[in-house]
Amino acid sequence: MDKDLNERQLQDAVSRVWGELHALDESDHLRGDELVEYVDGSLAASRRKMAQAHLAECDICASDVADLQQLRFTLKRRSATRWVPYAVAAAVAAIAFSIFFFYRSQPAPAIVHHHAPAPVHASEDPVAAKWRAVADAAVQHGSLEKPAIIASLNPAREVLRGAESKEQSSVVAPVGVVVDETRPEFRWKAGDDATAIVSVFVNADLVARSGQIRDRMWRPPDDLARGATYTWQVALTDGKRTIVPAPVDPPARFAIMSEADHTELQDTLQHVHDPLVRGVVCAHFGLQQCAVEELEKSGKATALVESVRSWNARGTRIPS
């Protein structure tokens, strides 16, 4: 008992307790061994990707990951002391005791923070810890999964009739993206002398229309509804009338994030300050521009930046 507890013993002890506790829960959560292997980086790549997706949705398992990371950090700092084995046993017992009585009755419990020996530095905010775990997994995987909403806005191209339009006029943005603004800026290309009328639809219903303008951008004067998917087009007049996108081209679609997602995003970003983690949060909500800007600030996520940019190859270009 005088020898330091090695890494394998720590993994076995915590994994055994977490495994037994999770076995008592009939709901869908990561197993104890998966939690430990996720924290120490030994979880298989295929399982890590699934765990990453689960942690983004499950506050309980994300809190477990944060607790294990904090315990691991604390014990590593004090591994030279003779009382480490006893500290581990006490910490694991405290975790077991807390989870037995409160584990499913309170969301995201910070168990180790209350029962384990206090760390030298204050522990990371639980919300930030949850998203840092997701970000770490994304960095190891080298990519970020495309949200379903982005996939729906960027369907595979189909040739409907004839050849693709060769007109120099085109819509620029927003196309194939999710935006957080309720009065987004619409931009398009057209000849120097062309006038334009912008029309915005939900399904076949017209919800906003500009007057005849000579500018190459327009912002609606009234808010568009959140949680909806829109299509838009520009009627150009320059000696002749032209509609862009042309009927043979894919429609220009975009979505405005829902009120619930908007609120959750803003609340989450108040807890997260690392640009890398903030970029992963933005990507989770489908906000590509925000994701790219934050990930580039981190200076260490080139693969993730390229992954996000690839989500909508035919739509709005996310600038470098």
Image: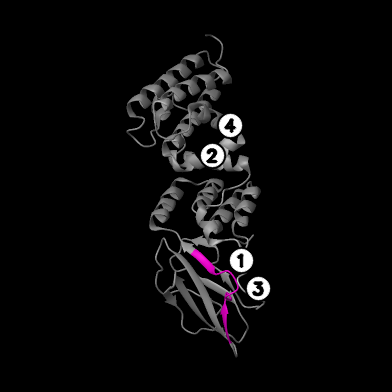
Residue identified by numbered label 1: 158
- Residue marked by disc 3: 164
Badge 4 or badge 1: first in the primary sequence? 4
The verdict on residue 33 being magenta is: no
- In the rendered view, would you say 83 is above or below 42? above
Task: Sort mark 3 into few (<14), some (14-19) or many (20+) by Cα contacts within 10 Å.
Answer: few
Q: Position of residue 154 (x, y in %)?
A: 56, 61
Q: Point out the tag, 3 or 1, that comes first from the N-terminus.
A: 1
- Answer left or right for 80 relative to 208: right
Name the residue tied to disc 2.
Answer: 50
Q: Which residues are magenta?
A: 241-254
Q: Residue at x 56, y 14 (%)?
A: 4
> Can you tell which quarter of the image residue 59 is in?
top left
Q: Secondary structure at mark 4?
A: loop
Q: Position of residue 32 (x, y in %)?
A: 48, 27
Residue contact between numbered discs 4 and 1, judged by CB atoms under 8 Å? no
Mark 2 and mark 3: Cα distance apart in space: 40 Å
For marks 4 and 1, give the CA distance. 40 Å
Amino acid type for the residue under numbered disc 1: Glu
Query: For residue 43, which numbered disc appears in the image?
Result: 4
Whole-angstrom CA distance, mark 3 to mark 1, is 10 Å
